[in-house]
Amino acid sequence: MNGRPVPDDFYEVAKPRLYGRIGRELRVARHVLDIGCGACELTEFLARGYHQDVTGVDVSSESFPRRARCTTSGRVRCVCRDARQLDFIKDEKIDAVVTMWALHEMTYPLEILSEAWRVLRPGGEILIVDFPRDSLAQRLWNETYCRPDELAEMLRETHFSLIRSRAIERGQILWAKGYRPEAIADRKRPAAPSAEKRLTKT
């Protein structure tokens, strides 16, 4: 932080910049899964700008775009589903998983990360973009957010490797990524998190 106050519209202003950064990060992926896709804005951005086949998943379909207004309908699929049970996606079929401003809303994040691990191909990337603890978001919405080290630990618990987790954009955005290991010895599906390890909202 450089001491300048963070305006209340910071996240709205930063969103296009973050979309571009996400696109560049995942640019080599062909099949992308967007968990907690909401109105599928990021889903459509990746399909339109990077010609990727993107599946968006959300527990509610109320904000999904109407098919007639979806300009990338051939590359985008929006599915109303609990991300803990992505049984419509086969093992190791996804090149990259992304979730933006959504993980903190999920009551069972470890189960969702385990399911993301399952659908990712070996070497595939997961990218988590969220709000960190003690950020502007905390003041605006007063929800429960993670610190970078806490999110890194969640990724380790669900067997991701090469993990990097940090705060960016003046400390207002949590940016974390990891990979499903390519080594055969590390490719056994991790056990589902125990009830004690499930994180619940406070």
Image (cartoon, helix red, strand yellow):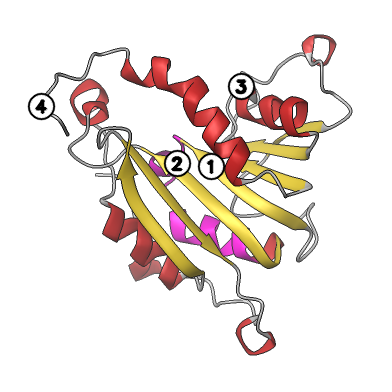
Q: Which residue is mark 2?
A: 129
Sequence order check, earlier mark of 2 and 4: 4
Number of residues whose C-alpha sits closer than 10 Å to that of mark 4, classed few (under 14), some (14–19) or many (20 or more): few
In this orientation, does residue 21 appear? yes
Q: Is residue 143 left or right of residue 54?
A: left
Mark 4 residue element: loop
Residue type indicated by callout 2: Val
- In this rendering, the label closer to the viewer, 4 or 3: 4
Number of residues whose C-alpha sits closer than 10 Å to that of mark 2, classed few (under 14), some (14–19) or many (20 or more): many
Of all residues shown, which one is farthest toward the left? Answer: 3
Which residue is at 54% across, 77% downward?
Answer: 191
Residue type indicated by callout 3: Ala
- Specify the segment rendered in magenta: 101-117
Q: Mark 2 and mark 3 in contact? Answer it, CB < 8 Å.
A: no
Q: Main secondary structure of the magenta part?
A: helix
Residue type indicated by callout 4: Gly
Q: Quadrant of the C terminus?
A: top left
Inter-mark Cα distance, 4 to 1: 29 Å
Number of residues whose C-alpha sits closer than 10 Å to that of mark 3, classed few (under 14), some (14–19) or many (20 or more): some
Which residue is at 57% across, 65% downward?
Answer: 179
Q: Quadrant of residue 171?
A: top left
Which residue is at 10% across, 26% downward?
Answer: 3
Sequence order check, earlier mark of 4 and 3: 4
Number of residues whose C-alpha sits closer than 10 Å to that of mark 1, classed few (under 14), some (14–19) or many (20 or more): some
Q: Position of residue 88 (x, y in %)?
A: 79, 52
Q: Mark 2 and mark 1 in contact? Answer it, CB < 8 Å.
A: yes
Q: Which residue is mark 1?
A: 99
